[in-house]
Image (cartoon, rainbow, N blue to C red):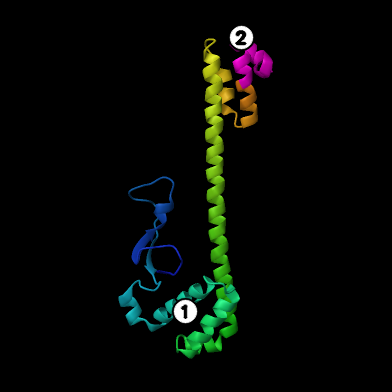
Amino acid sequence: MVFYNGKEKKPEDTTIKLSDAFLQKEEEPELELKVRYLNINQGCNQELMKRCRTLREYSEFVTRIRRYADGKAAIEEAVDRAVTECIEEGILSDFLRGQRAEVIAMSIFEYNEEEEMKKLREGEREIWQRRGKAEGKAEGKAESVLEVLEVYGQVPEYVERRILGEKDIEILSAWLKEAAKAESVEDFLENTGLKESQNG
């Protein structure tokens, strides 16, 4: 069983399966692991929270840290304030009083780790989007080179493969200019050095 208290919206109660991560989906996978996934953020799983005081209080503690950290306070101040208030209000008070330093250190670490992972995921998403755009531009440019060359007749298969395989926009732009100036496919191959690369 997993208790979830992250920032992303998740269902209150669901089952996650190892096979969901498999690249090749099978109806009856040879290996399977099922884990019950319970959201313990405030407002979720009310019945469970009523029955389990510790979970309810932990949820309140985490909510306070997030609330204070979302303001202008540094994470260290936010955690210290949440711990102090919870002790005063009887929320996990015995545990927080006895383990104050460790709880503060761990909470700061977890909060920073969550923020760093979020930044990392956003960075990866941006890289993939930029890479996708660049590949799309390269593909479009390569197709333009081939369209111009096809005016002169059949483009040899090795030339087509070489042009479509090129990902460098500057090279493709230079080839497009050469294709526009060329008087034949043969002329284009001579001017770009693609003829030599085939012979070599």
Which residue is the site of mark 1? 61
Q: Amino acid at mark 2?
A: Glu
Q: Is residue 77 left or right of residue 16?
A: right
Query: Mark 1 to mark 2: distance in Å?
Result: 75 Å
Magenta highlight on residue 198: yes
Residue 183 - label: 2
Q: Residues within 10 Å of mark 1 (few under 14, many from 20)?
A: some
For the question of whether residue 23 can be seen, the reply is yes
Above or below, comparing residue 45 to residue 176 in the picture: below
Image coordinates of residue 83 in percent, x first then y, are: 53, 83
Looking at the image, the residue that sits furthest to the left is 47
Task: Give SS at disc 2.
Answer: loop
Q: Amino acid at mark 1?
A: Phe
Image coordinates of residue 178 in percent, x first then y, are: 64, 18
Residue 138 - label: none
Which of 9/13 is in front? 9
Residue segment shown in magenta: 177-200
Task: Choose the circle earlier in sequence order: 1 or 2.
Answer: 1
Quadrant where the image shows the N terminus = bottom left
Q: Which residue occupies 53% across, 30% down? A: 139
Image coordinates of residue 155 in percent, x first then y, are: 54, 14
Which of 146/5 is in front? 146
Mark in front: 1 vs 2:
2
Task: Give SS at disc 1.
Answer: helix
Q: Which residue occupies 44% across, 46% down? A: 23
Q: Which residue occupies 57% across, 79% down? A: 104
For the question of whether residue 31 can be seen, the reply is no
Which of 44/133 is in front? 133
